[in-house]
Amino acid sequence: MSLLPLPPSAVSLGQSGLSVAPIAWGMWRLAEGGRTAADAARLVHAALDAGITLLDTADIYGFNGEGGFGDAEALLGEVLVAEPGLRAQMVLASKGGIMPPLPYDQSSEYLAAAIDASLRRMQVERIDLYQIHRPDILAHPQEVARTLEDALAAGKIGALGVSNFTQGQTEALAHFLDTPLATTQPEISPLRIDCFENGELDQAMRLGLTPLAWSPLGGGRLLSPESARDRAVAAELDRVAGEQGVSRSVAAYSWLMAHPARIVPIVGSQNAARIAEAAQALTVRWTRTDWYAVLVAARGVPLP
């Protein structure tokens, strides 16, 4: 039986000219638990040592409902100041446009200030990939596009993306931009399969967007499945994982990476060993039969 292709050794982020490893590391929990700069540095090194080059954060990472806004970016900034050579080894991604406790704000005034604040917290001159974190329904996409283009022209950011946008919102922003969007960052996992059938990934391929998958383990539910559906998906992943000598999480990452849209899973673990383990996903082979078996388990009904 023929095997689906392995992921490439490098994935282009749209037409931006940026190239990254086919798996990324995310820092939404970096600032939890009193983690120090030394602790954070060990995790950054674990990612880079595993061959991961895209490091993803956001200004709201660290916010706990009351405080902590910007803490993850600031902690990463301490790491980069202590070891300046690390900056050149990574493609640094961040996001903005959420103003706690939860209004979204992409007005020109707020978004421009948010970009500057992220640069200050991370103590860098440029964010390689800047994504709008969640869409602000009250912001005209032309206004958002103008603000992003100004930041690009100023050299503050290098490439543009969106996160949690609908297809229509993505099309609207793309229409008003002179610079093509490079990425889209939806939630995708073997437990969150909407985008495989609702056109999101088809749109990404049509527009040349690289999908960056957040929560690729279903928010941890794949590791501790409780519902019958979750257990069924885990069982199909375990079957392939057992045959190839990897963990369930590695099988889940590789399942996403087998899609032709070249999905880049964002590993959310803040454990150095688990970050290193994720690189094994580049070697897992899928047949169409096995891949669809996971999809069918997630659908809960047979394919038509």
Image (cartoon, rainbow, N blue to C red):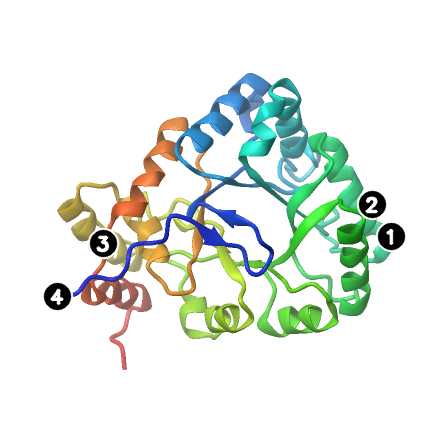
Q: Which mark is residue 109?
A: 1
Q: Split into 4 quadrants, where in the image is the C terminus?
A: bottom left
The image quarter containing residue 4 is bottom left
**Circle nearer the N terminus (4, 2):** 4
Distance from the alpha carbon under mark 3 to that under mark 4:
12 Å
Between residues 200 and 157, which one lies in front from this camera angle?
157
Task: Tell me the residue that label 2 is attached to.
Answer: 113
Label 2 vs 3, first from the N-terminus: 2
Q: Position of residue 65 (x, y in %)?
A: 66, 40
Q: Are the residues at dot 2 and dot 3 in contact (C-beta closer than 8 Å)?
A: no
Tag of residue 285: 3
For the N terminus, the quadrant is bottom left
Circle 2/circle 1 CB separation < 8 Å: yes
Separation of marks 2 and 1 at Cα, in angstroms: 6 Å
- Give the mark nearer the N terminus: 1 vs 3: 1
**Along the viewing direction, whichever of 280 and 230 lies nearer the viewer:** 280
Q: How far apart are marks 1 and 3 (CA)?
A: 48 Å
Instruction: Please tell me whether mark 2 or mark 3 is closer to you in this view.
Output: 3
Q: Can residue 302 be seen in this view?
A: yes
Task: Name which residue lies at 41% across and 27% down.
Answer: 272
Residue 190 image position (x, y, % from top left): 35, 57
Residue 22 bears which disc, if any?
none
Per the image, label 1 sits on a secondary structure element best described as helix
Q: Is mark 4 on a helix, strand or loop?
A: loop
Q: Which amino acid does label 4 sit on?
A: Met
